[in-house]
Image (tube, coloured by chain):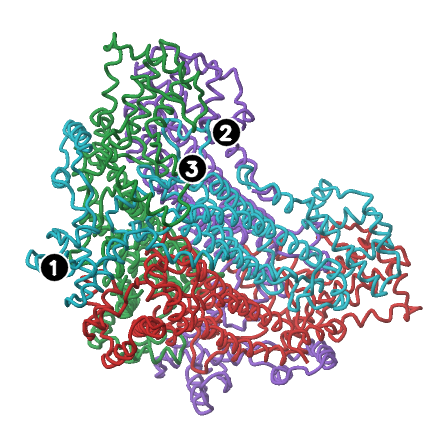
Chain colours: A cyan, B green, C red, D purple
């Protein structure tokens, strides 16, 4: 992975130094295992261990030898054995095959990398939880299909992010369960050289249990779900990043990614505060998905093994961890520095003209109207019309929609005209909260209902919202209040965060 | 493909009826080829052709036989041969292998399907071009990173969509060039049974040329680029769909997908006009990419062939064409019915407070300021500060940002407060167009510059925009006019659409 | 999915009939839930249920209405509501949103489909186990990198297939744990219409628990791992299929897929018995991976939801189940009908000239040689040379390797020559079992060791295998016996199959 | 890319040094363009160029500044501008946006990388051609579905590899056509700052033409086909590698990858000569496909651009080139060092017992038999039976197939038994070449035909191959000769290699 996105902790785990050190540990564990089972005389393990500890592993040497031998593990063995007298040499890598030496270290490195992902994800979960609690009572319009839907709190939005991420992290943890297994069962996994009890004893020293069903290698079906869980986790983070990108679109931004005091958003346009962090996460997600899909292909190896998976694992596993950690880190930066605008959330709610409660309005109208013969379909169509009425454009807008500017000069003039018109004080926002009880439905050219239907609906509304019996519809205004709409979120917060 | 997304024309092309008919054509072409080369006696071809034309192909019969033979082409041959007397039978499928019969029909069906894609794409191109021309002079703010950038015309946006799509379509057409090749070179492609001149003559009858390098089958490297081009094309459409979804987000929508007069957007919320067409296109793109990636795997077959690719081709090719055509059709529906709001585009421009020309402002300021010792860096930082100043939030907003509501009741009150405050007439939008020549820069807590720096900048601005020498900066206001900013778009329109 | 690969049980589960029936169940469960909590009067649920049960759901009607409403759930509601009097209508889909109705049925259908996969996979596991037991003592050469490695039993090969598949199936079962959750929390998941206790009560009737963290929909992170587990399972089956394809290559086939008594392998070549079932499984795996990767993309939806995932789910989920079941079914067919040749396995072992025990030979030689100063490296190089010697080609072969035929006529002659030479009785196979104790090492042009080295090795071997002290190396011949090499497999069989 | 698979030439092309150098070239080209159009005074370009050439670009400085500015291009600009006096600064990056500077260098680097791929692929093509010519007359059995099919020459196998690869390389070259375009059209591509003639002039200096339809960036649809072509090319190489792996399976290997004289194939088993190069290529193909699929996602960017694609491009493009070059290099190594065994190809042909001509045999028999009332179906079934007869196993084999060994000791005995039996001289291979004219068909338990049918067929064969009229079937033996079967390959060699 290029330096820009690399996580140093991952780089270290997957370094050659670390790998060779772990290989040595396995070789020693088998010697120790043999000794503990009385198969070789006492003292051999400590003799080998002592000798080797006196000589650092020489990677350049291994590199040179691999060019000749075309085999990295044999090159490693040569490097280590050169320090051992023949009688100790005979015990080093005895009856073992390369992947006896390599599998446990591979699993170990996966485990260490997953642990990093996990703990960084835990930190991110805390950061999201903090935002959920902080904005527990900050109303905003939820959005489905990009359109403003019902009102929710921003805290609730954060809560769903939190639960999504927690689910992804828990799924990762479950897949890690497979990492406690490994193998020392010889060239093709028949324990012909290393008998079962020696395999068990030696793996125990390394912290593993034998996998009954190994061939020359551990089957890759054990690790594929881990890759899947990692890319799923990055996709969850990308989902959150996308939400943040959508909410921070200029015009009416609900929040903004942190922007440094000396930062530049663009080399051309000085006003730019670009949400580049969230965008970068999308890139990480694209990469994570591809790495993960590539790793899955390793499940399919020929017979007792082929080495097609080796290159993919050397490259894709560390790179998958790099982009996963980078995604988490970047989201942590966003979450920590997110500048939230509860004020523009309010403005958005106001400008949505009561539609944020259209569901409640419809159900409430139906309830009030049932005694007056209102059907479910009518209730729906009345509220729909009221909503469309509330957003009826002004005349100048309609004109422009019909005939857009025909020249740049005309565009100049229109811009000036609109600049003035914007401040026309008469432009008080209407709302379905008022249109419906006031029985002010009008025919809309966007909907089917004709004048007669609309008249009938208005007259029905007049009966329902009879000003002489205001107690009958006293609750109407309540349904537009945050305290009414958001009341049941309390239950969800309790479920997720407890207390 | 399920009925909901299936294109009937594709269904027909990939039907069993069509396939068997095409297989028969190949068998006949080889007989005809032999006859034309004088290798068999005249009349055999017409005898076979006549007999077979008298009996429709019986798919149920083939189906039954395939269960026994485990081979669909052999089952087809049995069905056809049963109508032929032995001496004609001997000439039917003589020295041929299954894939001699199957390859040309396969290429033919690919070709016919691609032709449909192409002509539907051409129609879509026209629809986009119409919008480009119609909104040639309708200014809007371009967006990079979701943030408003410089002004452009909506026509120019359409123009880039048009060029993207045209590029994708041209790429598809280029890949189709490979479809003129096929093979009739026998079991493993050595022409051992069907000599080269017979192969050439027979393929010519079918409209193909021999591919020198066939094995039992045509190499799938010939077709993989077509799959790639198709999914790329759908991705371009998805890019356009995404732009449309982004522009139609409620609050300040720039346009809207067509919405039927009786349509319902949501079963719960009657106000919803969801942009579901664009979203569906994203689904099509996800599918197209997967189909395409799967088809590419077919490049790798064992030796002279294995049949692993067969199932993938039976399923993925027609499905890829289905989703491609559905994406085009859906985008055509959007493009034809798109309701564009030039008025909200204007409002968005106005509310961007001059930032849509920040680049020009910076360059212009630099030009004016150079004689006064203004550096490029200073010009950048001054315009940046002016932009941030223009968007300085009101006091009530700042308060809310610092301390969000602590209860639902407090949220209720805040909502009521903002509802009133919104109509405060004093809220005239400031703009960098004025802030800069007026030397009204103020310290911003978002940027580094301190009071001394800002004072120095203001004083420099005062020198530059000296009211006593207005002719020196007479052009300043011009740079905010559409006719100035968009002037060079004319060249691009000419390049792309001619005239 | 096309009929050829479709599983009728999956087709039924994902049929419109089943979907609408399940939707109705949800609508009724919510009414029942309200009734059980005393929120509506007793009897409403049974009244609605009774009325609806008297009218079958009319899919054509729904289809027609959807064209107008552009919304399938609203069309369904109209179909159902038309049979209800207004006062019951008011209670039907009350305060619900489309995905309240749709989510539980979706999870239910996933669950039922996974159950099918599971039980078919269990059957396949049994079939593999049967082969493992049957061929428990049938030796074959294992292969790594396509090359013969040590000897193993064919039963052990089956055992590793078994464990791989069991692992994949267990992983699937774990992911299914998420399917017990669903949601009835309203338009954007805030429980604003359907309070928490009603959600819980209604879901309980349907067999689900509420998911705390739903938006308008259930987050797709819950289902992505299921798709991953399914395609992993198909990849495991493809791994097995690939092994079977490799073992059944003609020349020296170890087994063969079942071949029907009337089957035809090729329309051209009557001798063909093609392993097309295994190849078809590769196609299934390619498709499964793509479906799975597409489904994962659904994790990322905009804000409280967008409908981009809908088309992908409608197509990819059932298709993923179809190909998964088809892969299992096809492998079941192979496993049940597999014709195994223990005799050719034997011949292969014999022709490998003792190399199947080269690891044991090396370790044994090292042990015997250590007292004579033999190093680990020498032991390795000696056995390597013995192996290369054993496979030294005959002179006629060497000649042909150097100068391949220069014309077709020369090829004719060579073929005739080799046909005769093959039966030359002098061609007794040599084996490392004999070469080494006989000290018959020769210089090989493929390896580095020169004559002096080889002489030295031979003389060392003579010392080690001193015929005067045969008791010192009495065990040498034993290491080439199956009973020696395979002894430890017993432990693995016990671990995996018990008893 | 990790060092093991990295191509130094690619590393250099994608190094930061190269990138910044190319960025500088663009900045200078625009200044030069302005000067050449008379928009700025003569001499500015050379003044800037001279000053900058005196100061090497300081990457560490850029790195430091990027941390503050969060923008790599702005950091680069600062680094360069610091050496320029204010009046020259004003002309540096004037009216440009980051991607004006970055796009041409990006295309340039793609082009240079593709050129490397191309020329390395050309070299590989030559190597394959050499093998095709060398083994032009070396017969081998072709394989379909892993089963021996008709005979072909190994040269013809190489020829198909050659054509596949040439097709892939040509496809790559076609996609490169798009690399001659670039953009200098300002922040959002409207040419508002850099007018069209300046864009054209400056790009011309750099060797590019303007792309009419750029936004802030070049649309990624231009580059996606290149990624597709690269991974297709690697898949073709992987197809060749797979064929080589299949042919080199031990037992009856047809060739072998080069194996070094000091190489070790396994740390455990000294006899191993593993075909690890071919396997590595499979890993490269898996990676190439994933990189390519990821790059394609970049087509879809939000509006005038988002930076999600940036990280993917920084990582995936160079990595895609690395693995592509590594795959080519590895295949070149295989092709150059491939050790081919024409002798084992011969043995394989002989052991296929005439089946390599079963198609010709069937057609020939039909021709001979038509006068005797033989139908096409009968001809097929007779040859099929003859083939199955030829491979009828010996009695000892049949016994073992029915009852595999029941203990390890029994396995020991069976092995010893078969070792002796193998050399039984009576085991002369029968062939369909003789069985058919000798009318020696026997009932097979694998096929449907009963004794009566077989008797009837034998008697028909006796009539056809009447020894009294040998001139009537004189050609029969000819069809089993290479010179007959391979005759038409000459045409293909001429088509592909000319001459």
Where is residue B369 shown, x and y percent of the image? 35, 13
Judge from the rendering whether residue A47 lies leftward or rightward of residue A119; answer left or right: right
Q: Nearer the viewer, residue B3 or A432?
A: A432
Residue C339, by quadrant, is: bottom right
Secondary element at image label 1:
helix
Residue wearing tag 2 = D66
Q: Residues within 10 Å of mark 3 (few under 14, many from 20)?
A: few
Q: Quadrant of the N terminus of chain C?
A: bottom left
Residue wearing tag 3 = B402
Q: Chain of mark 2?
A: D
Looking at the rendered structure, whether the residues under marks 3 and 2 are on a common chain is answered as no
Judge from the rendering whether residue D416 lies leftward or rightward of residue D233; answer left or right: right
Where is residue C148 shown, x and y percent of the image? 65, 64
Where is residue A391 shown, x and y percent of the image? 19, 46
Q: Chain of mark 1?
A: A
Q: Nearer the viewer, residue A64 or C73?
A: C73
Residue wearing tag 1 = A457
- The dot on residue C222 is none
Where is residue B263 shown, x and y percent of the image? 19, 58
Distance CA(mark 3)–CA(mark 2): 30 Å
> How many callouts does the rendering have?
3
The residue that appears at 91% across and 71% down in the rendered structure is C471
Distance CA(mark 3)–CA(mark 1): 46 Å
Secondary element at image label 2:
helix
Q: Nearer the viewer, residue B73 or C420?
A: B73
Looking at the rendered structure, whether the residues under marks 3 and 1 are on a common chain is answered as no
Any part of residue A155 in sight: yes
Give the label, 1 or 2, closer to the camera.
1
Give the label, 3 or 2, closer to the camera.
3
């Amino acid at each position: 992975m290029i330096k820009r996105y690399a996580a140093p902790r991952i780089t270290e785990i997957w370094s050659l130094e670390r790998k060779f050190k772990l290989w040595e540990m396995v070789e020693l564990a088998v010697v120790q295992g043999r000794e503990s089972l009385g198969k070789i005389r006492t003292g051999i393990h400590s003799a080998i261990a002592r000798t080797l500890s006196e000589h650092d592993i020489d990677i350049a040497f291994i590199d040179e030898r691999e060019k000749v031998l075309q085999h990295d593990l044999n090159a490693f063995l040569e490097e280590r054995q050169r320090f051992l007298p023949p009688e100790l040499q005979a015990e080093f890598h005895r009856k073992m095959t390369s992947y006896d030496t390599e599998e446990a270290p591979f699993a170990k490195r996966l485990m260490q990398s997953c642990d990093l992902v996990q703990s960084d994800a835990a930190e991110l979960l805390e950061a999201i939880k903090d935002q959920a609690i902080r904005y527990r009572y900050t109303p905003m319009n939820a959005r489905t299909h990009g359109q403003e839907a019902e009102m929710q709190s921003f805290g609730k939005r954060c809560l769903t992010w939190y639960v999504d991420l927690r689910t992804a992290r828990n799924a990762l943890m479950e897949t890690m369960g497979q990492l406690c297994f490994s193998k020392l069962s010889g060239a093709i996994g028949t324990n012909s050289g290393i008998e079962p009890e020696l395999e068990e004893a030696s793996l125990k020293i390394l912290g593993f249990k034998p996998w009954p069903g190994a061939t020359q290698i551990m089957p890759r079906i054990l690790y594929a779900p881990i890759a899947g869980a990692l890319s799923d986790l990055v996709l969850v983070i990308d989902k959150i990043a996308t939400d943040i990108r959508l909410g921070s679109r200029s015009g009416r931004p609900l929040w903004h990614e942190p922007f440094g005091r000396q930062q530049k958003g663009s080399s051309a346009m000085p006003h730019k505060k670009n949400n580049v962090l969230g965008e970068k996460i999308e890139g990480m997600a694209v990469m994570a998905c591809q790495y993960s899909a590539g790793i899955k292909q390793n499940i399919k190896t020929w017979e007792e093994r082929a080495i097609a998976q080796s290159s993919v694992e050397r490259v894709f596993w560390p790179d998958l961890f790099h982009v996963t950690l980078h995604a988490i880190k970047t989201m942590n930066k966003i979450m920590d520095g997110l500048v939230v605008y509860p004020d523009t959330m309010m403005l958005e709610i106001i400008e949505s003209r009561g539609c944020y409660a259209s569901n409640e309005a419809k159900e409430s109208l139906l309830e009030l109207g049932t005694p007056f013969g209102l059907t479910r379909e009518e209730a729906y169509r009345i509220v729909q019309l009221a909503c469309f009425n509330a957003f009826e454009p002004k005349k100048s807008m309609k004109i422009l929609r019909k005939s857009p500017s025909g020249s740049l000069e005309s565009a100049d003039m229109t811009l000036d005209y609109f600049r003035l018109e914007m401040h026309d004080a008469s432009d008080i926002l209407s709302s379905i909260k008022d249109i419906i009880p006031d029985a002010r439905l009008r025919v809309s050219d966007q909907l089917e209902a004709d004048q007669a239907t609309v008249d009938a609906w208005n007259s029905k509304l007049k009966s329902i919202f009879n000003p002489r019996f205001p107690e009958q519809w006293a609750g109407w205004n309540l349904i537009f209040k945050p305290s009414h709409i958001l009341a049941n979120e309390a239950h969800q917060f309790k479920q997720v965060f407890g207390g």
